[in-house]
Image (spheres, rainbow, N blue to C red):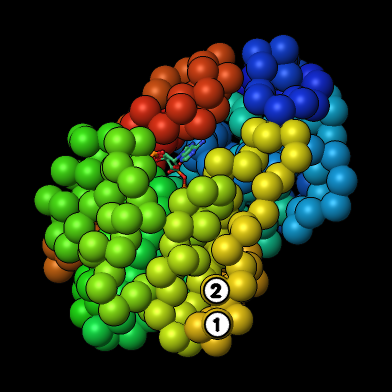
Amino acid sequence: LRQTVQNIVLASRPHGHITADNWRLTETAPEALQEGSVRVRVQYVSLDPAMRGWMNEGKSYLPPVQLGAPMRALALGCITETKAPGLSVGTYVTGGLGVRTEACVPAQEVAALVPGADVPLTHHLSVLGMPALTAYFGLFEVGQAKKGDTVVVSGAAGTVGLVVGQIAKARGCRVVGIAGGLQKCQHIENLGFDAAIDYKKEDVLQRLGDHCPTGIDVYFDNVGGDVLDAALAHLARNARVALCGAITQYNETSVRGPSNYLSLLINRARMQGFIVFDYMERYPEALEHLTAWLKAGKLKMQEHVMQGIENFPHAVTRMFEGKHIGKLLLKID
Ligand SMILES: NC(=O)c1ccc[n+]([C@@H]2O[C@H](COP(=O)([O-])OP(=O)(O)OC[C@H]3O[C@@H](n4cnc5c(N)ncnc54)[C@H](OP(=O)(O)O)[C@@H]3O)[C@@H](O)[C@H]2O)c1
């Protein structure tokens, strides 16, 4: 048993951008393990844009993180003690373990990783984890993408965006990715995206017109803001807009909606928000496909791993600065 557990707790709620004083590093005594729960040594914490929303007070799809409580986070770790039948010591699990070195959680809140699967552990938080499941269900269920469709994805060099683009290609779609900077645009083109638009340098509205001459059939939106408006202006008839996220708006004190929404009416299009957890029962089906694409070399993911629980505040800042390509993780053990 550990002597102490280190936790990053929510010290205050941000107003706009996150600041260092929103977090506090604490040390607590290990919890007593309850019947039906497991003790997990947390090894990797996933940095996700959704964290910003979880810090806010008010109604959302999950309750807000309480002040003084460990920050909510998806993470991966190894069971060190068990009072749950079927989950043994040494098993690796993923789940909402939080930003802490050790977590005691009910068995039903973790997913055990299949022993012997020949993929790096960290892939279970990226290309075979929640962001990839989000890409899969957002693209094929909400977006109804099919062979021959023109798919546009924003945040294209982020975790979700990279998976969206690659699995859309694997299904025979034409894919245009929107990302910030030359390096990110080159990266997605090297992965097989048909075109890349650098929203920091190029006129997105005009470039979407150039690259999507017959219009956009599926727009997978990760960013909201001006890029969403530009995509709406180029919808094809019966287009589907999958509203996955709006990272440009998360740190704003008031959210700005799209002004080009009448394009939905003109084009008989629809825009639908979704939350990946609603597809939980179908995760095995998605993981089967994602694993097959990964093994066939059709799906690749870059991961950037930062070190040390005390660096969590830097990692969150880095995520919103978009300095990395692909998945950002924090190794804490
Ligand atoms: N609906 C769901 O169930 C669900 C589940 C998971 C994720 N999501 C959403 O999916 C989106 C992508 O998540 P992810 O896991 O792929 O995140 P990620 O790996 O952290 O990538 C996010 C990307 O967004 C871009 N970005 C960051 N700040 C930005 C800003 N202010 N303006 C424009 N772009 C910005 C960055 O790329 P650039 O350098 O190109 O700007 C970065 O690569 C987020 O909106 C997230 O909330 C939704």
Q: Residue at x 24, y 84 (%)?
A: 148
Residue 95 position in % (x across, y down): 58, 51
Dot label at residue 263: 2
Whole-percent x, y for residue 112 in the image: 50, 58
Question: Would you say residue 327 is visible in this rendering?
Answer: yes
Residue 320 position (above or below residue 290): above
Front residue of this view, candidates 324 and 118? 324
Q: Is residue 250 left or right of residue 176?
A: right
Residues at marks 2 and 1 touching, judged by CB atoms closer than 8 Å: yes
Please state which amino acid type lies under the numbered disc 2: Ser
Q: Is residue 31 above or below residue 20?
A: below
Q: Secondary structure at mark 1?
A: helix
Residue named by callout 1:
266
Name the residue at 52% across, 57% down: 229
Q: Is residue 292 above or below residue 164?
A: below
User: Judging from the image, what secondary structure is the residue with disc 2 in?
Assistant: helix
Horizontally, residue 182 falls left or right of residue 31, namely: left
Q: Residue 253: horizontal and vertical position, in percent?
A: 75, 34
- Residue 141 is at least partly visible in this image: no
Left or right, 156 with reference to 137: left
